[in-house]
Amino acid sequence: MRCTRSLRGAATGTPLTPVPLSGGTLSSPFGIAEGPDGKVYVAGRSSANLVAIDPASQATTFFPLPGAEPMGMAKAADGRLWIADELRPRVLQFVPDSLLPTLAPVATPGPAPIATPAPAAPAPAPAALPKVAAKVTISSSRRGATTTVTGVRVSGLAGGESITIRCSKGCGFSTKRYAKLKGTSVTYGKSVFKGRRLTGGAIVTVTVSKPGRQPKVVTLQVRKGKKPTITVTG
């Protein structure tokens, strides 16, 4: 591609004179400005470069703009050339110098970082409640395929405990509750279970509870033709 130079007298119809370019290729020129050295600088959009033209000698010098697509250029008061790069987008500044022209992107402030609050400290785990100290004993007798609960004894009471007895089937009751007990021990026998014979699958649960403490739970499970199992929790 060739550039053209306007001669004196162009207003009277004098034709434009092409300026020969040597040492490089200028494609899609887009932006022209005068440098502080008196040369004319033209930006090549498609060729990604600048060409400096000496008006007196018409000598040309090419400066590559790698990775850029220059779209317009202007000279600042300090002589630097400011170039708009459409590809990034960014702004480049070119400092013409007879020895070492320099090309550098202009730093543009980005968005202010968003302050991230520090994660809240995990809540401390609640302190484990002390356990109810009472001891629960469930007495039973087995006859054939059935089991009879003969008594429930709770000892080691400190006062203020409550006892709940539950029976899943065959006891004649589902739940009996005895609240705010006094004394150190208590026994429940025939008056509660009435000698009833429990069949396989029946479950008797005794729970001793007290505010501010973990309850103690003792469970008796009747098994057909076998000795019942007893489990203790708490």
Image: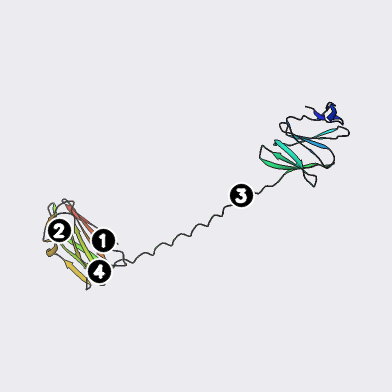
Q: Position of residue 162 (x, y in %)?
A: 23, 67
Residue 217, disc: 1
Q: Which residue matches tag 2?
A: 173
- Which residue type does callout 3 highlight? Pro
Q: Is residue 45 left or right of residue 16?
A: left
- In this rendering, which labeled residue sits more in front, label 1 or label 2? 2
Q: Is residue 97 left or right of residue 84?
A: right
- In this rendering, which labeled residue sits more in front, label 1 or label 4? 4
User: Residues at badges 2 and 3 in contact (C-beta under 8 Å)?
Assistant: no
Q: Is 157 or 225 nearer to us in this picture?
A: 157
User: Residues at badges 1 and 2 in contact (C-beta under 8 Å)?
Assistant: no
Q: Quadrant of residue 79?
A: top right
Instruction: Tell me if mark 1 has few (under 14), some (14-19) or many (20+) residues whose alpha carbon lies within 10 angstroms of its own.
Output: many
Residue farthest toward the front in the current orientation of the protein? 12
- Which residue type does callout 4 highlight? Glu
Q: Tell me if residue 156 comes above or below residue 24 in the rendering.
A: below
Q: Is 168 or 103 nearer to us in this picture?
A: 103
Q: Which residue matches tag 3?
A: 111
